[in-house]
Amino acid sequence: MISFQLAPELQDLRDSVALFAHEVVAPVIGGYYERGEFPYDLVAKMGKLGLFGLPFPEDYGGMGGDHFALCLALEELARVDSSVAITLEAAVSLGAMPIYRFGSEAQRRRWLPELCAGDRLAAFGLTEPGGGSDIPGGMRTTASLVQGQAGGEEWVIDGAKAFITNSGTSITSVVTVLAITGREAGGRNEISSIIVPSGTPGFTPGPEYSKVGWCASDTRELSFAGCRVPAENLLGGRGRGYAQFLQILDEGRVAIAALATGLAQGCVDECVAYAAQREAFGRRLEQHQAIAFAIADMEARAQVARLAWYDAAARLVAGQPVKKAAAIAKLTASDAAMDNARAATQVFGGYGFMNEFPVARFYRDAKVLEIGEGTSEVQRMLIARELGLGNPQLHPQRKAWSRRGVRSGHPAA
């Protein structure tokens, strides 16, 4: 029988992160959010808890856990605030994970220990100002291999990246950048991944974006102008960059689904507490069936989202194909987050429009979950593709129906 009961060590992790979120993050995060200030002290405390090292082996300074453990932590953090949750998610899933998955042993030893400790952060340089979801077609950043002035070959990088999380903090140590490094035999762009340390001449993080949500996280545009790094900063094989980051994005979507589930559940938590205290028309809000039903629907959406990311994360940890499950989880959870944030704001009424209340932050933070790490439209495209829609050869069930003479949904006579 399938069981969704967490193992004791995972339940302990969940409880400890929940306690941290409520006792350490909740009392202060509103101020950071309003000031648009990065919460360095909270990040340091998260590092001491070992959260940045959760899915990495102890050999590299990690906690020896897995992606499921990371997702549990993300959900509990996002029940209180999404800015700290996305800082963790981007630092681990997008920043450190490519180095662990595809880096050489020397690259792992160089970068992972300080990233696992949370002393430093890493970023993922993928999206470009004119590209959006069309990563390969919209890519303009280039890297050319030239002879270095001091001997040895170097990559010279030119271009720009947009919407990059954790890329300009004072503790950011490295950004992994996707760039066109040549042409493949068929004429397509050869895309490779290159590690660029912070402070490298020619690499300039732009000013902080003024954002609708995630206001206590760091997000910037990056520019590269004659930026030179050693040839050995290539991450994995030349021309493998796009394939590498498709894998990283699949894993990242599971993490974002967990974060979105946390936001959806946080909306429930806030509404349950508020409805038990607030009175209207002589009764507590919880005694009004319309309010009770609205909160019940919110809880149902959060639970469905949780089951979706549990399934995707379990498949990922087991080494099973995860593309469709990750897309379903991300789509389901981001929808739940947006719907629950809208409903929670309505339950709170005028107070839901006031930034001092968490549901106002949740409402501002929810929308980007339908955009980042693959829009909802991209998730639907991936799911449809995995079903073989548009290409019957990819789906054996369609061929089986065809062999039985099914045409337009009606059996042949």
Image: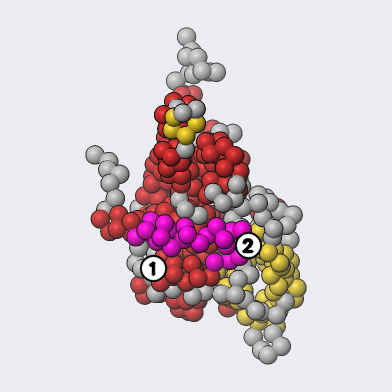
Q: Main secondary structure of the magenta part?
A: helix
Quadrant (top left, top right, bottom left, bottom right) of the N terminus: top left
- Outermost residue on the front side: it is 282
The residue wearing badge 2 is: 35
Seen in the image, is 253 located left or right of residue 69? right
**Residue in the image at 58% along x and 73% along y:** 172
User: Magenta stretch containing residue 249, yes or no?
Assistant: no
Q: Position of residue 125 (x, y in %)?
A: 62, 64
Which badge, 2 or 1, is on the more N-terminal residue? 2
Residue nearest the viewer, comparing 43 with 249: 43
**Which residue type carries mark 1?**
Leu
Any part of residue 151 in sight: yes
- Where 332 falls versus 219 (above or below)? above
Q: Nearer the viewer, residue 278 or 29?
A: 278
Nearest to the observer: residue 257 or residue 130: 257
298 or 198: which is nearer to us?
298
- Disc 1 designates what residue? 49
Kind of residue sitting beneath label 2: Arg
Q: Residue at x 51, y 18 (%)?
A: 409
Identity of the residue furthest to the top in this view: 413
In magenta segment, residue 27: yes
Residue 297 found in image quarter:
top left
Mark in the foreground, 2 or 1: 2
Image quadrant where residue 77 sits: bottom left
Could one spot residue 257 in this view of the protein? no
Find the magenta span and give its range: 16-39
